[in-house]
């Protein structure tokens, strides 16, 4: 290479098996680098490396130690690939070929036998199974933040660095990592410098609703067999509109190419699991239907997590679409293991203070991301509105709203916001909510206020309150009898029709409506109950399964900041989960690149070509009798 470099001749390296590829260009100036606005030209690895470490307090301030070490290595014919020494001079380490490590240690032990015996040098040790990972680029020189981004990428991928070296020309940063982390390290730093996508290995845990037989769909022997395996009925009629897990799987597979282009991220779904079965794949899943058909292995949470957390990919994520407390209890452990978690499962956050503290501590001190926006509002961004208020220095006076889409729908039908119209019977509204998939797996969670209470508890804890379910004053949505409340299947809901109709009619006569209202005050007073509210109020206007939260703060005193909307279909909730996944991608260094290009639509062209009539002249006075303005 030297003659070509001296003659200012660029060198091209091409792949024999891919002659059409651009290859690598080695050149003298950085003009091309500036044109590309690229800091890093590439990354390299040196594998089968061992670290030889010489340390001891007797080395501090003693001249000639380094010379002696490298004279010994030269005499032993051991080439050194990298050297690192801290400023305290307490130790010096260097990388050599794994096959030369034993010879280097033996020679150094002999050469420094007296110093070792006197305790001036503590030991000569070998660290095996190492690799050197290096970043190389002409644009690195005098560019701020390169090393920070490099090491941050390795840290986010939970890769431990054993040794570091950088030349003063700033064109190379070399690190030593464990050999098993080599590929993951390369992928992490590649994506950090946008030379490749941020790659995330994803596993999806389905909820009970995802594995229930689909009523009215393809039946027969195939449907029965699939149901007996805990899989959705109707193998040939995949329904992404009925269940959150299936909707998310479909969304991620459909949008994978768009995510690669827009966010430069590669979201690879490599596993799905139900309570009874799972599918693990080394390659990204491509078809929801084929994935569900191929699900055969018995569920094993440890095996599932180990598969998702692979050494070949830098980042791993488990998405919990269930409402199972047993699965939620695993969230903290996954976070400790370096697996990011996105969840629609509120159980871990609303459980005991100890359970919440485990999650909170991992969020505070750990490196793993925990996204739970959809656990509160489904597709409605309740937390995304609350957190900027708090971060911006505002404080909450109280929060009021309806957080149960089931009860919002039921009482919106029973007691419509148009007080002049007649609502439907309570039992009829409940069955409609069930048919639309708005109800929890156990309807009693809604009727008894458990779902609303859990969401209120999580909001309180996000405000810094040590709130528990026992602190919330709960009134069930209907006055259940003593023998009810233990199982919805035994309840005859029609017995409540007359009483609830009378209460709704009485409210309508006063211009009010019935709504199941949650309220949390800044000092921790919390309650959920069926209340009569003004039909024109923010809460009174909620119906049709819409949920809403009104934030009364020090800055929003007289008129609250309101976020509301439908809790959403499974597709809407899946979109909320994808939003949390993209927030993780942003933390890992991904950026929204915006649309690839702007376009004009036929409607825009029509409007542009339309000739508007001239505007009438402005009057000389604004108010009748006003004096002409002074120039």
Image: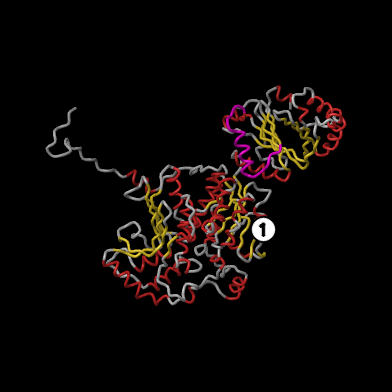
Quarter containing the N terminus = top right
Left/right of residue 391 with respect to residue 305 in the rendered view: left
Mark 1 residue crowding within 10 angstroms, few (<14) / some (14–19) / many (20+): few
Q: Position of residue 586 (x, y in %)?
A: 54, 44
Q: Which quarter of the picture shows residue 188?
A: top right
Instruction: Name the foreground residue: 151 vs 28.
Output: 151
Q: Position of residue 41 (x, y in %)?
A: 64, 34
Q: Position of residue 580 (x, y in %)?
A: 52, 51
Magenta stretch encompasses residue 184:
no
The boundaries of the magenta stretch are 141-162
Q: Position of residue 319 (x, y in %)?
A: 57, 56
Name of the residue lying farthest toward the left? 625
What residue is shown at x 62% (from left), y 48% (from top)?
A: 315
Residue bearing mark 1: 302
581 to 48, vertically: above or below? below
Left/right of residue 457 with respect to residue 280 in the rendered view: left
630 to 380, vertically: above or below? above
Instruction: Name the foreground residue: 82 vs 224.
Output: 82
Magenta stretch encompasses residue 150:
yes
Count of labels in the image = 1
């Amino acid at each position: 290479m030297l003659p070509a470099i001296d003659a200012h001749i660029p060198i091209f390296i091409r792949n024999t098996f891919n002659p059409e590829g651009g290859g690598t260009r080695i050149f003298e100036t950085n003009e091309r680098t500036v044109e590309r606005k690229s800091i890093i030209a590439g990354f390299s690895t040196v594998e089968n490396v061992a670290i030889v470490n010489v340390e001891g307090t007797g080395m501090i301030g003693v001249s000639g130690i380094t010379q002696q070490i490298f004279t010994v290595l030269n005499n032993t014919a051991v080439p050194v690939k990298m050297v690192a020494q801290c400023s305290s001079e307490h130790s010096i380490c260097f990388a050599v070929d794994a096959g030369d490590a034993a010879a280097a240690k033996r020679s150094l032990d002999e050469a420094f036998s007296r110093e070792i015996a006197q305790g001036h040098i503590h030991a000569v040790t070998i660290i095996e199974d190492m690799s050197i990972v290096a970043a190389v680029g002409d644009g690195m020189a005098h560019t701020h933040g390169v090393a920070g981004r490099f090491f941050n990428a390795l840290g986010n991928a939970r890769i431990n660095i054993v040794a570091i070296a950088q030349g003063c020309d700033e064109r190379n940063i070399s690190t030593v990592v464990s050999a098993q982390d080599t590929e993951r390290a390369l992928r992490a730093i590649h994506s950090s410098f946008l030379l490749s996508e941020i790659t995330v290995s994803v596993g999806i845990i389905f909820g009970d609703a995802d594995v229930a037989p689909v009523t009215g769909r393809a039946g027969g022997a195939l449907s029965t067999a699939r149901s007996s395996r805990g899989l959705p009925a109707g193998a040939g009629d995949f329904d992404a509109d009925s269940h959150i897990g299936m909707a998310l799987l479909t969304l991620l597979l459909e949008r994978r190419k768009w995510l690669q282009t827009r966010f430069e991220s590669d979201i690879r779904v490599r596993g799905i699991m139900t309570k009874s079965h799972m599918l693990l794949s080394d390659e990204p899943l491509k078809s929801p239907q084929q994935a569900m058909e191929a699900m055969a292995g018995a569920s094993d949470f440890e095996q599932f997590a180990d598969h998702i957390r692979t050494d070949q990919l830098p980042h791993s994520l488990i998405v919990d679409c269930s409402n199972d407390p047993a699965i939620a209890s695993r969230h903290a452990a996954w976070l400790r293991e370096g697996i990011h978690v996105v969840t629609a499962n509120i159980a871990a956050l609303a459980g005991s203070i100890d359970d919440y503290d485990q999650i909170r501590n991992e969020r505070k001190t750990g490196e793993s991301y925990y996204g739970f926006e959809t656990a509160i509002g489904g597709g409605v961004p309740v937390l995304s509105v609350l957190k900027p208020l708090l971060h911006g220095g505002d404080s909450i006076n109280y929060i009021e709203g309806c957080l149960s889409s089931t009860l919002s729908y039921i009482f919106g039908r029973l007691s419509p916001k148009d007080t002049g119209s007649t609502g439907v019977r309570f039992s009829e509204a409940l069955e409609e909510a069930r048919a639309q998939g708005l109800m929890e797996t156990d309807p009693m969670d809604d009727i008894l206020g458990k779902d609303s209470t859990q969401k209120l508890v999580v909001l309180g804890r996000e405000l810094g309150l040590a709130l528990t379910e026992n602190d919330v004053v709960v009134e069930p949505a209907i006055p259940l009898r003593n023998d009810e409340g233990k199982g919805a299947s035994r309840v005859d809901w029609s017995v409540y029709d007359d009483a609830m109709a009378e209460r709704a009619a009485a409210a309508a006569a006063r211009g009010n409506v019935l709504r199941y209202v949650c309220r949390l005050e800044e000092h921790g007073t919390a309650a959920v109950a069926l209340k009569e509210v003004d039909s024109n109020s923010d809460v009174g206007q909620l119906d049709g399964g819409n949920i809403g939260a009104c934030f009364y703060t020090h800055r929003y005193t007289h008129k609250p900041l309101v976020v509301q909307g439908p809790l959403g279909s499974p597709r809407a909730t899946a979109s909320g989960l994808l939003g949390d996944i993209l927030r993780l991608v942003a933390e890992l260094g991904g950026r929204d690149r915006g649309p690839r290009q702007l376009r004009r639509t036929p409607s825009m062209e029509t409007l542009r070509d339309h000739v508007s009539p001239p505007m009438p002249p402005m009057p000389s006075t604004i108010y009748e009798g006003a004096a002409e303005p002074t120039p």
